[in-house]
Image (spheres, rainbow, N blue to C red):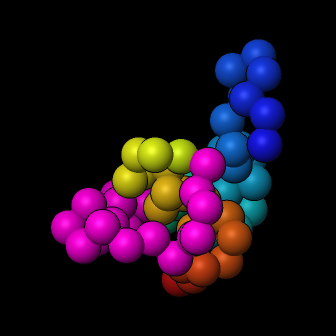
């Protein structure tokens, strides 16, 4: 994925479509980022992001984490 012009992967619009609410997205991503930080394991083999929060958002976008 190319990060030209400050674009981020995945976009907020794509993520909100997956969760149905930006508030659910924030809570789920924060919880999952904490888990990744604590155990060092992501469900994505080669994440684009090095940061835990970015990896959590990628997991949500790719359907590895389901937000209810």
Can residue 21 be seen here? The reply is no
Quarter holding residue 15: bottom right
**x%, y% of residue 13?**
74, 47
Q: Is residue 45 above or below residue 33?
A: below
Residue farthest top in this picture = 5
Q: Residue at x 60, y 61 (%)?
A: 46
Specify whether 38 is left or right of 46.
Answer: left
Q: Check the picture and name the quadrant holding the N terminus.
A: top right
Quarter holding residue 67: bottom right
Specify whether 40 is left or right of 57.
Answer: left
Q: Is residue 31 above or below residue 50?
A: below
**x%, y% of residue 41?**
37, 73
Q: Is residue 22 above or below residue 27?
A: above
Q: Is residue 15 above or below residue 66?
A: above
Magenta segment boundaries in residue numbering = 28-48
Residue 42 magenta-drawn?
yes
**x%, y% of residue 11?**
71, 44
Q: Residue at x 69, y 20 (%)?
A: 6
Residue 31 magenta-drawn?
yes
Specify whether 24 is left or right of 21.
Answer: left
Q: Residue at x 60, y 80 (%)?
A: 64
**x%, y% of residue 68?**
53, 83
């Amino acid at each position: 994925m190319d990060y030209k012009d400050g674009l981020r992967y995945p976009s907020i619009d794509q993520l909100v479509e997956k969760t149905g609410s930006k508030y659910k997205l924030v809570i789920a991503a924060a919880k999952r980022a904490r888990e990744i930080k604590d155990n060092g394991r992501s469900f994505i083999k080669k994440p684009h992001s090095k940061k835990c929060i970015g990896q959590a958002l990628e997991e949500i976008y790719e359907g590895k984490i389901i937000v209810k």
